[in-house]
Amino acid sequence: MEPTSFVVFLSSVLFVIGALGVLLRRNALMIFMSIELMLNAANLAFVAFAQRWAQLAGQVFVFFVMTVAAAEVAVGLALIVTIFRTKRSTSVDELAQLRG
Amino acid sequence: MTDWIVLGLLGVLSVASALGLLLSRNAIYAALFLVLNFVIGAVIYLVLNAPFLAVVQISVYAGAIMVLFIFVIMLLGAERLTPAENPPGLNYQRPLALILGVLALGLAAYVLLTRQASAAPVAQSVDASPTAVGLQLFRNYVFPFEVVALLLLAAMVGAVVLTRKTE
Amino acid sequence: MTLLIVSPILFPLLGMLINALFGQRMRERVVGWVASFAVIAAFAASVVLFVQLSQSHGEPLRLTLAPWITAGALNVAWGFLVDPLSAVMMLIVTGVGALIHIYSIGYMHGDPRFARYFVYLNLFVAAMLVLVMADNFLVLFVGWELVGLCSYLLIGFWFQDVKNAAAGRKAFVVNRIGDVGFVLGMLLIFATFGTLDFETVFAQVKVRGESLAAVASLITLLLFIGATGKSAQIPLFVWLPDAMAGPTPVSALIHAATMVTAGVYMMSRAHVLFELAPTTQALIALVGTITALVAGSSALRQVDIKKVLAYSTVSQLGFMVAAAGLGAYVAALFHLLTHAFFKALLFLGAGSVIHAMHAAHGDVDPQDMRAMGGLAKRMPFTFLTFVIGGLALAGLPPLAGFFSKDEVLLAAFADNPLVFVLLGITAAFTALYVGRQIVLVFLGEPRSANAAHAHESPAIMTMPLAVLALLTLAGGAINLPGGGWLHHWLEPVLHEAAKPLNVGLALVFTLIALGALALAWVWYRDAQRARLEVESALGRFLLSAWHIDAVYHATVLRAFYTLSTICSQLIDIGLIDAAVNAVGRSARAAADQLRAAQSGFVRNYGLLMFLGVIVLVVYFVVVR
C-alpha cells in the first residue's frame, strides 16, 4: 500500500461519513456542515494526488474549491436564516411542499 | 516508517472527529468537531507538501466558515437538537442510508486492497511555497481566478439581499 | 328548339325556385297558382313537342345540353330524347300533374308549410320529366333518385307525427335496395357495351344479338330489381301502403300516376335488352302476376280508404309488369295511361271524402271506412266521379280501364295460361274490393257524426275530378282493340304486333266484374260485416298483406338490428371505447404509482442520488 492510496482511502471514508450526515440528519445546519465535510474530503484527495505527481495544479484547484465553498456557505446560511424566519424551525422535513 | 505512523494517527483522529460531527446531539459540539477535523486536515496538508493550503484551510475554513456557522447556530437557537418523529414516507430512510454507507465503505476498501497503484516513479518534490502557488494562479489560472472573484461578489450580494428585512 | 325541348323541365324548376325563395311572403293562392301554372306551361310545351313529333312521323328530337362525365372510357352527357314513348309519358306526367297541383291548392289550404309543399311538388314534376326524357341510363337514374327523394320528402310532409317520418324513411330505404340492383345493372351495361347511351346500346344489341343472351339475362335481372323497388313489386312493395301517410294529392300523383310507373317505363325503354332474355321475362311476368294477386287480395280487407287504393295500385302495377314480362309493352303502357287517369281520380275523390270527414264533429279516424256511409247524398259530385273511377278500375266497358285491362288479359291468354288464370282471379278481386269500397263509403246510412255532417268539396277540388272523370270515360278511345292509336304511335319505338279483339274474353270478364260488384253490394249493404270480417284469421291475414311486413321484421330487420346492436354495444362501446379508456386509465394508474417517488422530502432525494453515485462507482470499479 502506498501513502497516496491510504490518503485517498481516508478521503473516501470522510466522504461517506459526510454523506451519511446529509442523509440522516434533520437539522438544516447539520446537513450543511456535513456537506462541508464532504467538500473537505474531496480537497484531501486532490492534495494527495498533487503530491504524488508533483503538480501544483491540484493545489490550485483546492484553492478554488475552498473559495467556492465559502461563497456557497454564505448564501446557504442566508437562505436558512430566511426560511427560519417564516417556518420557525430548521427541520428540512417541513419543506416538503413540492410533492407529486 | 515515520510517515506511516504520522499518517495513520492523523487518519484516525480525522475519522474520529468526523464521527463526532455525525453523532453529536448538540449543534455547537458538532461545529467544534468539524473545526477539529479541518485543523487535522491542515496538518495532513503540511505532511503532503502543501503549506500554503494548510494555512488557507485554517484561516478560511476553520476561521471564517465555521465562525459563520456558529454565529448562525447561536442566532437560530438551534444548539439543542431534539430528535423528532420521522414523518411517514421516511421510515426506511435510516436503514437504507446505513446500508448504502456500508456499501460505499466496502467499495472503498475493495479499491484500496485490490488495485495496484501506479508504478511510475515518484517525482521530485516540487516547490509548493506561496510564491509558487501565487505564480500559478496569476499565470496559468488567471481566468478562473477572476471568475471566482466575480462569484464571491455575487455571493456577497446574494447574502445581503436575502437577509434584508422587507419593509 | 333547345329551349323548347328543355322547357318542360325548366318551367317546374322555375316555379320551384320562385316558391322556395318567396313562398313564405306570398299568399296561398299565389303560391299554389305559380306552381300550377308552371306545370300547365310544361304541359303546353309537351303538347307542342307531341305535335312536332307527330308531324315528323315519330322521328325523335334529340338534345345534348352539356357534357357531364368524361372519365376514360366513360362518356356521359346531359342528353335528352323526345320520342313517341317519352312524349306519352311527358303528357301524362304534366297533364295529371297539373290537375293535381290545382286540387292541392284546395286540399292543403291552411297548412303552415303550404309553400314548401308546392316546392317539393314542382321539384317532383321536374325530376320525373328528367327521368322520362333522358337519353342515357345515368341521366334516367338521376331522375329516378330525385323522384325517390321527393317521395320521401312528401310522404313525411307532416313529420311532426313520427309515424309519417318513419313511413318516408321506409319508402326511401326500400327504394334504395332496389336501386342497388339498378346501379349494378348499369355497371354491367357499361362493361358490356362501353356506353350508357340508349340509342348506342340498343343499336349494338341489334348487331350483336344472340351472343349477348347470357349477360343480357343478368343485366335485365338487375334492372328489374330496381323496377321492383320503384314500382312496388314483390319483394319490395311494402313501402307503398305505408306511403299513404303523406297528403292525398301526393298519393295520387306520385304513388299512383307517375313515380311508380317509372319501372314500367324503364322496362319499355330497354325492351330490346329484355327481349334477349326470355328467362328474365318469364320471371318478370310471374313476379308481376303474384304481386297483383297478393295485393289484390289484401285490398279486400283494408279498412282505411287510402290503403284500399294503395294495394289496388300495387295490384294494377303488377298487371303492367306482367304485361311487360309477356312482351306486351303497348298493353302495359296503355294500362299505365288509363290507370293514371282513374287511380288519380279515385285518390283525389278519396281526398275529397277525407277532407269532408275532417270536420270538427266527433273524433273518428277520417280515413276509416267503417265510420263512413251515406256520403252519396251529401257529396254527390264526388260520389259520381268516384263511381266512374271505380268502375273503370273494375274493368267495365266502355270506361278506359276496361280496354287497357282487357289488352293485358289478352296478351296473357295468348302466351301464358298460368299468368292468365291468376290475373283473371285478380280481376275478379278488383271488382270485388271496388264494390266493397263504394258501398261502405257512399251507400247506406252515415255511421258517425263526421259522416253525417260531411259536405261537398270546393270547386277547386271538384274541377280536377271532373276533368279526370272525362278522361276516364273517353280514354278507351286512345287504343281501341285490334291496333288502336297508341299502338301506332308507339310503333317506331316498340315494333309490336297488334292482337285482334277477342270478344268472348271481353264478355267473360265483363260478366265476372258485374257479378263481383253485385256480390259486394249484397255483402256490404249491412256494414256490420265490414266490422266483423277483419277479426277473423283470414281477415287479419289479408289486412296485413299476407304478413309480409311481419316476416321482413322478423328476419331481415331483426338480423339487421342485432348486427347493429353488436356493432354499437359490443364493438364500439365494449371494444373500442373500452380500449381507448383503458389506455387512459392505465396512464393514470401508472402515473399514480410513479408519483410516489416525488415525496417532497429532500432526504429521500439525497438517498436516491447517493444510490445513483454508488451504482456508477460500482460500474467503473468492478465492471470495467
Image (cartoon, helix red, strand yellow):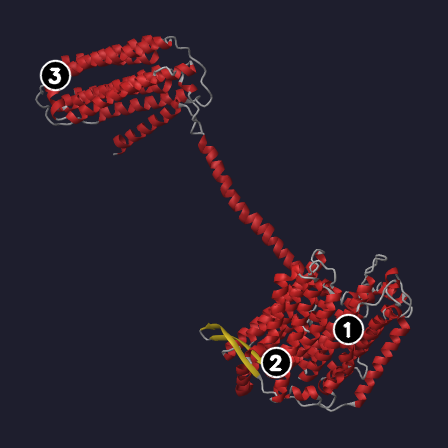
Q: Looking at the rendering, which quadrant does residue B11 occupy?
A: top left
- Under tag 3, what secondary structure? helix
Residue farthest toward the left in the current orientation of the protein = B124
For badge 2, the amino acid type reads Arg
- The residue carrying mark 1 is C463
C224 vs B87: above or below: below
Q: Name the residue under label 3.
A: B130
Inspect the image, locate mark 1, and give the three-letter code of the amino acid beneath it.
Met
**Which residue shows up at 65% across the image and 68% down it?**
C122
| Residue B27 drawn above or below residue C308 | above
In the image, C38 versus C493, the foreground residue is C38
- In the rendered image, the quadrant that contains the C terminus of chain C is top left
Tell which of C605 and C465 is nearer to you.
Answer: C465
Side (left or right) of C478 relative to A48: right
For the residues tagged 1 and 2, is the chain the same?
A: yes
User: Mark 3 is on which residue type?
Assistant: Pro
CA neighbours of label 1 inside 10 A, class few (<14), some (14 to 19), many (20+): some
Question: Alpha carbon of mark 1 to alpha carbon of mark 2: how far?
Answer: 34 Å
User: Are the two marked residues, 2 and 3, in contact with CB atoms closer than 8 angstroms?
Assistant: no
> Pointer 3 indicates a residue of which chain?
B
| Image coordinates for residue C113, horizontal then vertical, percent | 69, 59
Asked whether C582 or C246 is in front, the reply is C246
Quadrant in the picture for the N terminus of chain C? bottom right
| Tag in front: 3 or 1 | 1
